Image (cartoon, helix red, strand yellow):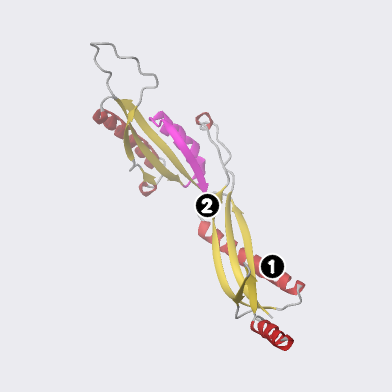
């Protein structure tokens, strides 16, 4: 009986000599691998700005409101073209109409005519400014021509693809160095890479702007390009 138990235990060790355990289960592996994550970021001064504005009007006549909004949008577009912006970089396609609720509607008395329903008609104007020294003047002119709201100004770099490649290269090198350090720590030699996966994105630094700041300028911050690389290496 004792002999049979010894044989069974030895047989179990031989079968599982080349496997790893996860969640109390034995998983067979064909290679000895080391798995690491590498990351890197690259900062750059932005040289482009994307502005988002809205022109809107509240009225009881949707047709009349649309005419007024369209006129204002056309003036804003013409101003931007005269300032040197490319027509292809100016968009005003979004158009919205919705009923505007009264914040405190009065009680209707008997015999009174119901109040007229008011509607909000709006269009968004999105433009890319390639000369940042024109940004203040364009925003100021757009507000004077009827822009009700500046919804955001996003700064970015025209070299984002080049910067992304640089960040990826640095992230890959970071992953390789991590793998080499870990392998050496445990007396192993780093082998060839067997799997590479990447992820990352553009992350502009936060920038806040109020309407009162248009005429005086504002800080534009930096653009940060981030990249992450997951890699698996053989170890010897």
Residue name at image x 45 percent, y 41 percent: 51
Residue 150 part of the magenta segment? yes
| SS at mark 2 in the image | loop
Residue name at image x 60 percent, y 81 percent: 30
x and y, in percent, of residue 118 in the image: 30, 25
Query: Mark 2 or 1 closer to N-term?
Result: 2
Query: How far apart are the two marked residues, 2 and 1, measured between alpha carbons?
Result: 30 Å
x and y, in percent, of residue 17 in the image: 67, 81
Residue 73: mark in rendering = none
> Does residue 97 appear left or right of residue 233 in this picture?
left
Q: Nearer the viewer, mark 2 or mark 1?
A: 1
Magenta stretch, residue numbers: 130-157
Residue 217 part of the magenta segment? no
Q: List the residue tagged with mark 2.
A: 157
Count of marks overlaid on the render: 2
Answer above or below: position of 178 versus 100.
below
Residue name at image x 59 percent, y 44 percent: 221
Q: List the residue tagged with mark 1.
A: 178
């Amino acid at each position: 009986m004792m002999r049979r138990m010894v044989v069974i235990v030895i047989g179990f060790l031989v079968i599982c000599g080349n496997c790893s355990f996860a969640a109390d289960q034995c998983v067979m592996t064909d290679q000895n691998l080391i798995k690491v994550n590498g990351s890197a970021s690259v900062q750059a001064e932005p040289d482009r700005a994307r502005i988002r504005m809205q022109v809107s009007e509240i009225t009881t006549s949707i047709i009349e409101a649309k005419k007024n909004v369209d006129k204002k949008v056309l003036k804003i577009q013409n101003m931007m073209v005269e300032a040197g912006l490319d027509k292809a970089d100016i968009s005003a396609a979004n158009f919205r109409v919705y009923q505007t609720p009264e914040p405190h509607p009065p009680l209707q008395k008997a015999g009174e005519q119901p109040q007229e329903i008011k509607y909000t008609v709006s269009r968004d104007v999105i433009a890319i400014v390639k000369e940042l020294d024109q940004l203040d003047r364009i925003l100021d002119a757009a507000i004077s021509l009827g822009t009700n709201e500046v919804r955001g100004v996003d700064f970015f770099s025209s070299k984002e693809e080049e910067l992304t490649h640089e960040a990826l290269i640095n992230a890959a090198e970071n992953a390789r160095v991590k793998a080499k350090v870990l392998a050496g720590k445990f007396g192993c030699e780093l082998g060839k890479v067997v799997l590479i996966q990447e992820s990352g994105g553009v992350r502009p630094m936060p920038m806040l702007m109020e309407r009162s700041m248009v005429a005086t300028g504002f800080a534009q911050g930096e653009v940060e390009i981030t990249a992450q690389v997951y890699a698996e290496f053989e170890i010897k």
